[in-house]
């Protein structure tokens, strides 16, 4: 999957257009778009209600009529990111469903690293968040997984993809001071710090899928 691409059904993070000399019409969607654009451009430290309001040309207090507080803003951002996961109907191959789901999670993290790092631990409640999980679990159940093993497989792949994506955001480098006795880490430090490739991500995912397939066939 081309990680830089986006489908026509995805919502844009670009800011709403303004009339000359007038602030943009304020709405929850406009606020979320401004917040996501701010995060993409300047990182997590820039996300304050005051800064988001400044992007929209309004006072910070105006935002609270549409977004109750910063927690609600983060919940909305989680919903926006989840909406970028491609819908699947649960009728295809279970392994392909997991591949697509994992690839979409990593692609979202690469498009919106600051937002992903902020909302990655949000409780999943909105339909846009629950829909992709429903599709994956439906594919697993249709593929012969018991309820318990379907949940296990979903959690395993989701944890791998999310953890890998977060590690890419924060970096893989390990800093060893000269006086510390870790010769193997020191000898491998350049390799550890190198940017992981798509092939690395896919290889790890296929290892997981191979284990799940072998377990299912042994049932």
Image: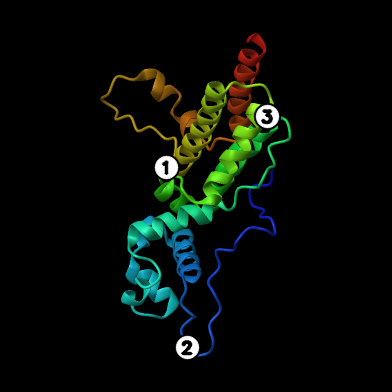
Identify residue for label 2: 22
The correct choice, above or below, for 59 with respect to 20 in the image is above
Tell me where residue 113 appears, x and y as whole percent: 48, 50
Label 2 and label 1: CA atoms lie apart by: 39 Å
The correct choice, above or below, for 101 with respect to 119 in the image is above
Tell me where residue 108 appears, x and y as whole percent: 56, 48
Q: Which mark is residue 94?
A: 3
The answer to whether marks 2 and 1 mark residues whose Cβ atoms lie closer than 8 Å is no
Q: Foreground mark, 1 or 3?
A: 3
Q: Quadrant of the N terminus?
A: top right
**Which residue is situated farthest in the right direction here?**
92
Residue drawn at the location 60% of the way across and 36% of the way down: 197
**Which residue is situated farthest in the top direction here?**
218
**Image coloring type:** rainbow
2 or 1: tag closer to the N-terminus: 2
Residue drawn at the location 50% of the way across and 30% of the way down: 155
Classify mark 3: residues with Cα within 10 Å, few (<14), some (14-19) or many (20+): many
Identify residue for label 1: 170
SS assignment at label 3: helix
Q: Foreground mark, 3 or 2?
A: 3
Q: Which mark is residue 4?
A: none
């Amino acid at each position: 999957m081309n990680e830089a691409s986006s489908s026509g059904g995805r919502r844009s993070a670009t800011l709403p257009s303004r009339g000359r000399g007038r602030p943009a019409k304020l709405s929850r969607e406009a606020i979320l778009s401004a917040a996501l654009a701010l995060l993409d451009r300047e990182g997590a430290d820039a996300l304050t209600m005051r800064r988001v309001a400044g992007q929209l040309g309004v006072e910070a207090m105006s935002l609270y009529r549409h977004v109750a507080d910063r927690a609600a803003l983060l919940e909305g951002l989680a919903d926006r990111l989840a909406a970028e996961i491609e819908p699947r109907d649960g009728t295809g191959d279970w392994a392909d469903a997991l591949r697509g789901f994992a690839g979409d999670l990593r692609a979202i993290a690469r498009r919106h690293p600051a937002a992903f790092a902020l909302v990655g631990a949000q409780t999943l409640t909105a339909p846009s968040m629950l829909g992709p999980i429903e599709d994956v679990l439906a594919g697993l159940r249709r593929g012969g997984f018991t309820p318990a093993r379907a949940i296990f497989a979903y959690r395993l792949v989701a944890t791998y993809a999310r953890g890998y994506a977060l590690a890419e955001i924060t970096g893989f480098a390990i800093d060893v001071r000269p006086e510390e006795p870790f010769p193997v880490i020191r000898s491998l430090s350049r390799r550890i710090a190198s940017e992981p490739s798509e092939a690395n991500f896919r290889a790890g995912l296929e290892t997981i899928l191979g284990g799940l397939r072998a377990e299912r066939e042994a049932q």
